[in-house]
Image (cartoon, rainbow, N blue to C red):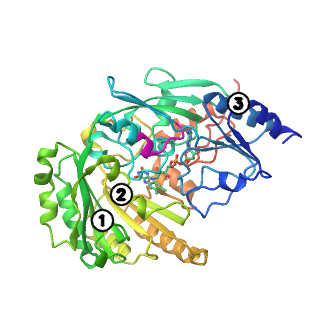
Amino acid sequence: MKDGALDRLRGKLLGEVVGPRDAGYDSARRVYNAMIDKRPAVIARCLGTADVVTAVRFAREEGLLIAVRGGGHSVAGHAMCDDGLVIDLSLMRGVHVDPERRTARVQGGALLGDVDRETQLHGLAIPTGQMSETGIAGLTLNGGVGMMLHKYGLTCDNLLSADVVTVDGELLTASADSHEELFWALRGGGGNFGVVTSFEFRAHPVGPMMLAGFLAHPVERAEEVLTFLRDFSASSPAYLSADALFIHAPEADFVPEEFQGMPMVALFVRYFGPMADAWRTVQPLRDFGSPLYDSLGPMPLVAVQSMLDTFTPAGNLHYWTSEFLPGFGAEQIAAVAAIGSDLPSSLTTINVHPFDTAATDVPADATAFAHREDSWLIHVICQWQDPAESDRCRAWVKKASSQLKAFGHGNTYLNTTSEDDETDRVRAFWDEPRLARLARVKAAYDPDNVLRFNHNIAPAPRRAAP
Ligand SMILES: Cc1cc2nc3c(=O)[nH]c(=O)nc-3n(C[C@H](O)[C@H](O)[C@H](O)COP(=O)(O)OP(=O)(O)OC[C@H]3O[C@@H](n4cnc5c(N)ncnc54)[C@H](O)[C@@H]3O)c2cc1C
């Protein structure tokens, strides 16, 4: 950077400018995954869209690459970079709900818990993920999978428009009638195309009360539990979400003391339909096997959406992968059960998620998100605390990944992977026509690949002049 550059930026930004010599530098560059240790040249903690425009223009003048931090939850560490400029949106967490139109405008640094709290004031909810501290931005841009998937689709399926600051520092709105190709790309193409300062979502009448909890089974019965889940999910109502979680039960008040720390496979059940039908709808799940414990009960949506927070606090070391499995027959079930029964640390979890957006009728090519047709999404969420365990844990994930890949097409859910074979995964997730279309959008909005700290899409080559 040129001499005095940081001071010049300080003079223009309403928010805070943090450089390597500033006291707050180490906390500002810290992200969720403690494996990530990047040292940006400058972090611009923006307070509004005008700050984002200023920071982007500054980066371009100084020839800096740009990373964008939404919630900072990317396990691959894409919110930070070495030597470049980080646009940090963590001070931009506003959520404004329009109850008449059933829409919500959400700033680019908001967390899922912010969104739930504000929308629930009006008895509304946006389909998002399942932990309150994940950022809405990264989650939406690469899809967004949570309990409302079967009923209301991915988070990106509910996006109505996005305010975007381009790498040239221009502000535009992408929607179905404006910058349509960009709007298509933002729904599944990740943070490749610009800085989203706010999202406008469609919201749905859900909550405030739901029925939710865990039905915990001994891990030795994993194959039976997964087989039951597969058969049950084939015809379960869209208001009911049931995943299987391989976990060591946490020391939480919803887990009886005698089971805390025990490895188990738990059905994580969430019913968000009419409460009068709630207990009847979940009864078949409760009737299966003889659960070690059954914690199902009525609770507010905001509490349900933070129930898993205890499993994954910020600051641990993480290495994740995930795989879409086109089928879930006996062989796949045996493989997943074996992986789930051999977790390398007591903090590691496997999340087995029936993946189906059919009820939403979103056509396959309507958004950049690929593989709606796949039916089971397996998340391998490896976390530990002692750096001496890092090699062993990463090796375990790589082995699990290759076992799962044998059944699928190598299609990972990009939001939940920190694998190093990034290029292969990007190519496997987006089919050729989609990737070519994304590359054209990238070339139109970021031809120099200034935004490359993401699941990166290389810009399509410029055509030679005739
Ligand atoms: C504990 C935990 C739980 C999770 N649960 C779920 C879940 O239930 N469902 C699910 O689908 N996923 C889940 N995820 C994955 C999550 O969706 C991704 O990690 C996602 O990237 C998080 O978004 P973020 O804004 O917090 O991330 P960040 O690390 O801030 O950013 C991720 C990527 O998005 C880009 N980006 C961020 N903000 C913007 C913006 N405003 N404009 C443009 N680009 C931007 C970044 O540059 C980066 O490339 C979970 C992750 C964690 C760690």
Which quarter of the rendering shows the N terminus? top right
Start-end of magenta stretch: 108-115
Does the rendering let one see residue 155?
no
Of 37 and 252, the residue lying toward us: 252
Residue at 22% x, 74% y is 292
Which quarter of the rendering shows the C terminus? top right
Please say if the residues under marks 3 and 1 sit with CB atoms less than 8 Å apart: no
Circle 3 packing at 10 Å, graded few (<14), some (14-19), many (20+), is some
* Disc assigned to residue 307: 2
Residue at 52% x, 74% y is 393
Q: Where is residue 279 in the image (x, y as percent from the top left)?
A: 13, 53
Circle 2 packing at 10 Å, graded few (<14), some (14-19), many (20+), is some
Q: SS at mark 3?
A: helix
Vertical relation: 427 (above or below) 265: above
User: Which residue of the protein is positioned furthest toward the right in this rendering?
Assistant: 3
Amino acid type, mark 1: Phe
Residue underneath mark 1: 254
* Disc assigned to residue 54: 3
Q: Say if the magenta span includes residue 133.
A: no
Does the rendering let one see residue 16?
yes
Please say if the residues under marks 2 and 1 sit with CB atoms less than 8 Å apart: yes
Amino acid type, mark 2: Met
Residue at 12% x, 60% y is 284
